[in-house]
Amino acid sequence: MIDGLGLEDVYGATIERIKAQGGDKSRLGMGALMWICHTERPLSPDELCHALAIELGSTDFNSSNIPSIMTLVSCCQGLITADKGTSTVRLIHFTLREYLSAHPDIFSRPHSAIAEICLTYLNSRQVKALSADPWSALSALIDGNPLLKYCSLHWGVHAKKELSDCAASLALQLFTEYDGHISAALLVARTGFRPDVYTGPLWSALHCASHFGIVEVVDALIKTGYYDLNEGNCWGYTALSLAAEKGHEEVVKLLLRQEEVNPDKPDRDGRTPLSYAAESGDEGVVKILLAQEKVDPDKLDNHGRTPLSHAAESRHEEVVKILLGQEEVNPDKSDYRGRTSLSRAAQSGDERVVKILLEREEVNPDKPDIGGRTPLSYAASYGHEGVVNTLLGQEKVDPDKPDHLKRTPLSHAAQSGDERVVKILLGREEVNPDRPDNGGRTPLSYAAQAGHEGVVKILLARDDVNPNKSDNLGQTPLVIADRWDRQGVIALLRSHEAAAHSAA
């Protein structure tokens, strides 16, 4: 909230002065405020200056229209500043953003306006002339066209929020040449696409519109009859997968109304629209897809993972419940690494999901993967105290179960350095605090290497821990600590050794 120092009156009066400047000064001042308040991320001075140079609907970008950042600061009557530390332009104070948010009528449909400007820029002759294969000179292209990346990656976000007829028309104009447009390549580049791995089409117009979730534009593209609705992009994602991943329910419904759409088509990784919706955690989309007769709720991808596995790892409690309500779903199914949904949830640290899975009789709480690691091992390694306690409350869980390298949950916890988890495990009488692995290394050895002084102290306080035990290479914890230059641990070990000698 804006404080009671009269700031609201000050801001209101300043904005009126900006408007009263008239002409370009008023346009630049109000335009700068609108962009700064409503963009998806902070803009650099060059990006903002280029944005305000664009003439709506023009087929040419006139570089002579680009104002200086000092001009913009002046036109905004000091309400904006160029932050040298972040290389961005921002409002002068957070209370100004609060004021502008409380007065939405100051700007008329800002997201539509930004979408229209972005699309005008992407449709300009200069941008259309840029190479659509920017892999070898991407940074140079962006440096020479500072607004290009923002417009390519975010125009659709603004259009989805407020789609004007003008923005819809400009989007369809862009899509007439989208296959060879640099904005398509930039959108794909953000996904980590490598042209030496995959070949074929990048993103079609339908893929783009579905990714952004713009229902009206998707509908218009479908009605052209030009697009194969099941065609995959460079990753094999269909339009339905892209919409499902982003949680665009209305686009998902629209696509599923088309008879030719396969609701369960996998991509190159074998992942289906349901798999992506489950990972993203969109309950609505998950329910819509599960209502489709052809959708397999337990379908394996190329790594042997199910939608439940992805939902559990991503900590989506409600989606996990929905999937567990499907008869076909096996809650204890292992992927090709032997990992179950419980194992994934334990690693992520979601105690609620872990408890939901443990309620199912079929779930083995101590099931090892192909490396012999149990859910407890993963929870201990990542320091998830709540999950560790929950799993230790299961009768079938062995708190000292070694993996194939003979490393125990305590060994992993000691290496990661979580003192609370180490104490919990040491509180179980079944746990051997000095148990060596296949390399002869003890929990103390791993804690010493990592420099976890707190864990080292805890272990040294145990009478059943030998601080001088050598591993298979003849290295004691002190030798290892010295090798890794862990000065604090070295001091602890030497102090403990000196105390032991004194007591003797």
Image: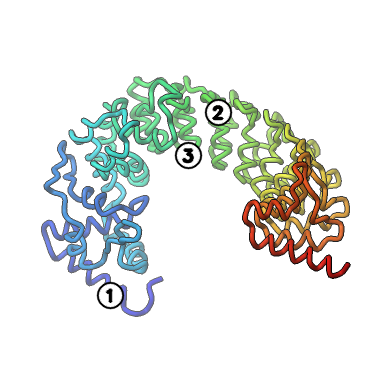
Quarter of the image with the N terminus is bottom left
Residue 468 point in image, percent of width and height: 80, 54
Disc 1 to disc 3, how far (Cα)? 41 Å
Residue under the point 81% across and 51% down: 469
Say whether residue 500 is left or right of residue 331: right
User: Looking at the picture, which amino acid does disc 1 mark?
Assistant: Asp
- First in residue order: circle 2 vs circle 1: 1
| Residue 383, visible in the rendered structure | no
Say whether residue 188 is left or right of residue 400: left
Residue under the point 62% across and 28% down: 303
SS under mark 1: helix
For the residues bearing labels 2 and 1, Cβ distance under 8 angstroms: no
For the residues bearing labels 1 and 3, Cβ distance under 8 angstroms: no
The residue that mark 2 highlights is 272
Q: Residues within 10 Å of mark 2 (few under 14, many from 20)?
A: many
Disc 2 to disc 1, how far (Cα)? 54 Å
Closer to us: mark 1 or mark 3? Answer: 3
- First in residue order: circle 1 vs circle 3: 1
| On screen, residue 134 above or below 423 | above
Q: Residues within 10 Å of mark 1 (few under 14, many from 20)?
A: few
Quarter of the image with the C terminus is bottom right
| On screen, residue 327 above or below 43 | above
The residue that mark 3 highlights is 246
In front of the other: 370 or 126? 370
The residue that mark 1 highlights is 9
